[in-house]
Image (spheres, grey):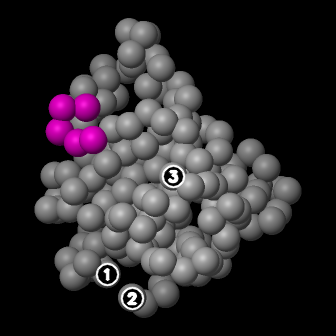
Amino acid sequence: MENKKDKNLLCGSACLQYMFAEQGYGNIDIPNMDWIIDMALYCYLSSSLSIELRYHKSRLMDDYFLGQLDNDEVKERVEFLLQEIMIWEEEITESKLKNLIAENMWGILNVNSNLLFNDVSFAEHRHFVLIKKQNTSLINVISPGSENFRKINVTISDLADMIKGNGQWAMFLN
């Protein structure tokens, strides 16, 4: 795929655009989505890919299961996804992540920007990145920048550290 990114797309939506183009869907319009649950719903409704979501210690899901989620639209999306796709609550350890990458064609992960870019000015930022199935010791992370996609090689250990925190959200697709 061409390295250019639609300047108006948020990082998660840009990951979907890249993935769909690689899957042969062409250059389709992708709406901007902030939340991985919205990306999962979009994939479910727009493709024949199988989808599973992973999270660990997510405030959103804790609030949902405790009946404390006060946003009805988000609550409806979560309820729909719980019925239609696999959603797992478990810590994604280094070995689990390695297996998930080997078993799935694609992964969209919510990572710590500071660790990905080795830049403390991003200490409080999260960023969605894309990974494609691979069986190498280095993982090729596809990161949407403001204008281009960057490919960054990281170890599985580093990637496991990058996804810790903020609910440890990850979506895997086949």
Viewer can see residue 118 = yes
Label 1 near label 2: C-beta < 8 Å? yes
The main secondary structure of the magenta stretch is: helix
- Where residue 61 sits in the image (x, y, percent)? 44, 25
- Where residue 118 sits in the image (x, y, percent)? 80, 65
Disc 3/disc 1 C-alpha distance (Å): 25 Å
Callout 2 amino acid:
Met
Q: Which residue is tagged 3?
A: 96
Viewer can see residue 32 = no
Q: Which residue is tagged 1?
A: 22
Is residue 48 left or right of 66 when viewed as pictured?
A: left
Disc ID at residue 78: none
Secondary element at tag 2: loop
Q: Earlier in the sequence, mark 2 or mark 3?
A: 2
Disc ID at residue 1: 2
Callout 3 amino acid:
Lys
Q: Is residue 92 magenta?
A: no
Q: Which residues are magenta?
A: 82-86
Task: Tell me the mark number nearer the camera, choosing from 3 and 1.
Answer: 3
Disc 2/disc 3 C-alpha distance (Å): 29 Å
Is residue 66 left or right of 74 when viewed as pictured?
A: right
* Picture quadrant where residue 29 is located: bottom left
Q: Residues within 10 Å of mark 1 (few under 14, many from 20)?
A: few
